[in-house]
Image (cartoon, rainbow, N blue to C red):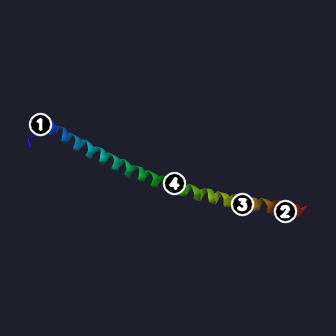
Amino acid sequence: MNLSNEIVVAVIGLVGSTFGAFIGVVASANLTAYRIEQLEKKVEKHNGVIERTFKLEGRMQEAEHDIIELKGAKK
């Protein structure tokens, strides 16, 4: 089987391009997975802050209610 130089070069180029594209897709997928993981951590942290803020607002309302009751009792 005698292949011409042009065909050999074309096949080598095709294999190289395919391999390069595959490596690019894998690297991109890994980077996307890493970024999603980091965003999930940030969202988790943010949700913790929201939950703590909600609890503090409830405690603040209780404290304000107690202050109003104390002011009313002194009169």
- Secondary structure, mark 1, is helix
State the mark number for residue 69: 2
Can you name the residue that lies furthest to the top here?
A: 6
Can you name the residue that lies furthest to the front here?
A: 1
Q: Which residue is mark 3?
A: 58
Q: Residues within 10 Å of mark 4 (few under 14, many from 20)?
A: few
Q: Which badge, 2 or 4, is on the more N-terminal residue? A: 4
Q: Amino acid at mark 4?
A: Lys
**Residue 52 drawn above or below residue 26:** below
* Residue at image point 73% right, 59% down: 60
Q: Which badge, 4 or 3, is on the more N-terminal residue? A: 4
Q: Which residue is mark 1?
A: 5
Q: Residues within 10 Å of mark 3 (few under 14, many from 20)?
A: few
User: Viewer-nearest of labels 4 and 3?
Assistant: 4
**Residue 40 drawn above or below residue 5:** below
Question: Could you tell me how far apart the alpha carbons at marks 2 and 4 are, in whole angstroms?
Answer: 41 Å
Can you name the residue that lies furthest to the left here?
A: 2
Residue 28 position within the rendered picture, expressed as x and y whole percent measured from the top left: 37, 47
Q: Amino acid at mark 3?
A: Gly
Which quarter shows the C terminus? bottom right
* Residue at image point 14% right, 35% down: 6
